[in-house]
Image: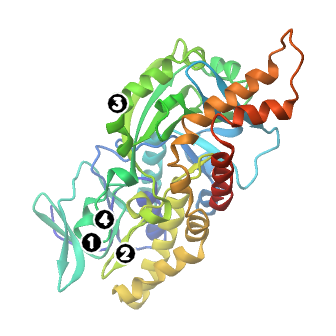
Amino acid sequence: MVEEKWDAIIVGAGVAGSVAALLLARANARVLLVERGHQAGSKNMSGGRVYTHGLKRIFPHFSEMLPVERRVAHEKISLLTPDRMTTFDYRSTQPETDNASYTVLRASFDHALAKEAESAGATVLTGARVDDVLTREGKVSGISIEGETLLSDVVILADGVNSLLGERLKMTQKLTPQKTALGVKTVIELPQNLIEERFQLSDNEGCAWLFAGAVTSGLVGGGFLYTNKASLSLGVVCHLDQLNEHNQSVPEMLDAFSRHALIAPLIRGGRVGEYSAHLVSESGIHGVASKLFDDGVLIIGDAAGFCLNLGYTVRGMDLAIASAEMAAQTVLSAKARQDFSAHALSSYRTLIGESFVGKDMTTYRRCPALLKTPRFFKDYPELAANLLEDIFTVKSQPVEPLLKRGIRHCESIGLATLAKDIIKAARSF
């Protein structure tokens, strides 16, 4: 490998890394995008939904250029017990808006993004593991791959939630079970017409469905189901610090979830096309990198901890895209001045703080603590199912007033406890 100097080296060809490479290459910067997998996207995984407001700034006609699956028009959130399910259901027939979201399969989606970066002039190096980040006189000056040195003015770390390079540079902290979850997902192939029939979808419509409760046996975590064109993405996420309290692994939870009497009919006849696992940051703003920049280096996307789980929606890719865009702006500004010091790169932190990324994560800073309340995953699914079963069951005895029935069911948890949880949720959101 010939040693040469790049304007920027980006480690990791996920959504964040590829977008940063694309934007820098469009501005005629000399960019090297390094990916450990045999191709971009081969090692990347998420539930499979992207909010496209950021994509539209970069690709005004992204749905024609990138392999998106279905536009989400049907939202569902379910509280699951071993034999019952309470569901909040929303669907829309409105035409696509600027704030639409799509289901995606990361293997093809990330690969296409990297190809766009390459077409814009970036060099993409796959199948290459970065061994270390090089520093000279206290400044990051490049990377090493299998003993070979590659120099650059700036290095952008986009190497995922468990950024070992960021940890070595003391920009991120070592992951702990209390701040991390494990997600396991399978992609189940089904004919397109069968998916549309089972989920009552038409044309390019898609469904995003989140679950809590029995999917993780009452532990802190949840499940998800996303419809793709000719497949379903089905997965389970569970906090790592919860697993030592249970004799079931996350893959076993996914297996049990797929066999649940109310889920099995939706995937019946499908063939497993993919199976993968991924660590997920679950700390919100408290899990963001302690240093977003330093002399000659920036950190973006999952590596920087930009992930937001609100219970009713999970955001990561839109935050990654925005952070990549702001990192590219910062590098181009530094390149114009030929100053890649920490002071010159500090505008990245300002851009993050003034954008929806920093503001949304600040607004929902209490959500991680709320979503670690065990009652939301064990007691409340049972409460909701018991209450609705009581409401919809007609008996020969005289009807008890609805309010009285509601209070009686709530007393199973405790009215004071319920009031505290409602106040806690109100403050969190």
9 and 226: which is toward the camera: 226
Question: Label 3 crowding class (10 Å Cα cut-off): few <14, some 14-19, many 20+?
Answer: few
**Residue at the extreme left:** 147
361 and 229: which is toward the camera: 361
Distance in Å between CA atoms under marks 3 and 4: 26 Å
Quadrant placement of the N terminus = bottom left
Distance in Å between CA atoms under marks 3 and 2: 34 Å
Q: Is residue 403 left or right of residue 255?
A: right
Residue 32 percent location from the top left of the image? 32, 64
Dot 2 lies on which element? loop
Dot 1 lies on which element? loop
Q: Nearer the viewer, mark 1 or mark 3?
A: 3
* Marks 4 and 2, the one that precedes in the sequence: 4
The residue to which callout 3 is attached is: 249
Tell me what residue is drawn at x 42 percent, y 42 percent. 45
Kind of residue at badge 4? Gln
Asked whether the beta carbons under mark 3 and mark 2 sit within 8 Å of each other, the answer is no
Q: Nearer the viewer, mark 4 or mark 2?
A: 4
The residue to which callout 1 is attached is: 170
Q: Is residue 249 above or below residue 126?
A: above
Kind of residue at badge 3? Ser
Tell me what residue is drawn at x 40 percent, y 64 percent. 304
The residue to which callout 4 is attached is: 173
* Marks 3 and 4, the one that precedes in the sequence: 4
Asked whether the beta carbons under mark 1 and mark 4 sit within 8 Å of each other, the answer is no
Asked whether the beta carbons under mark 2 and mark 1 sit within 8 Å of each other, the answer is yes
Distance in Å between CA atoms under marks 1 and 3: 32 Å
Residue 291: image tag: 2
Query: Is residue 312 at all visible to an observer of this figure?
Result: yes
